[in-house]
Amino acid sequence: MRWHKSFIRENILFSRFMFSSYRETNRVLPVVDFTLVGIMFPFQFYTFGYSMYFVLRDPLLVFRFLSLIILMGLFYMLFYIRFERNSDFVYGVLYSFLHVFVLMWTIPYAALTLKDGRWLTR
């Protein structure tokens, strides 16, 4: 939780001066990165909400979404086995489900509890 809170805090601080002339050269990539990261998290939850809307309209889409989670987990497992070459790759699909159903929600929780002094480190 501490990492998400500090990530949000640092982005807020960076947004105060990133469009100013804080340096003369190489200013484009930080602005592009900041913009893409700023769009990525809201888009992720918009897509999830939009998907849940369609699941409520057609419950059979649950199987399609679960198969997409498995497919993405398999894709990451192939990448992992290509570069790491150990047997931990079998946890890739399980981690994909953990990310979608648990870890994805730590970012909005961190944003909602940003002013809370406890950063859940211990």
Image: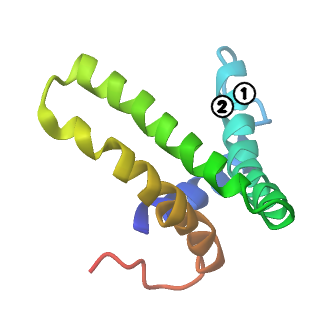
Q: Quadrant of the N terminus?
A: bottom left
Verify CB contact (< 8 Å) between mark 2 and mark 1. yes
Q: Position of residue 6 (x, y in %)?
A: 49, 61
Residues 65 and 19: in front is 65
Q: Residue at x 24, y 36 (%)?
A: 89
Q: Is residue 85 above or below residue 70?
A: above
Mark drawn on residue 33: 2
Query: Could you say whether the residue bearing mark 1 is in a helix, strand or loop?
Result: helix
User: Quadrant of residue 76 in the image?
Assistant: top left
Q: Residue at x 35, y 23 (%)?
A: 79
Query: Could you say whether the residue bearing mark 2 is in a helix, strand or loop?
Result: helix
**Residue holding disc 1:** 32
Q: Quadrant of the C terminus?
A: bottom left
Residues 89 and 66: in front is 66
Residues 50 and 14: in front is 50
Q: Residue at x 41, y 67 (%)?
A: 2
Q: Is residue 65 left or right of residue 116?
A: right
Q: Residue at x 79, y 36 (%)?
A: 19
At label 1, which amino acid type do we have?
Val
At label 2, which amino acid type do we have?
Asp
- Structural distance between the alpha carbons of marks 2 and 1: 4 Å
User: Quadrant of residue 58 in the image?
Assistant: bottom right
Mark drawn on residue 100: none
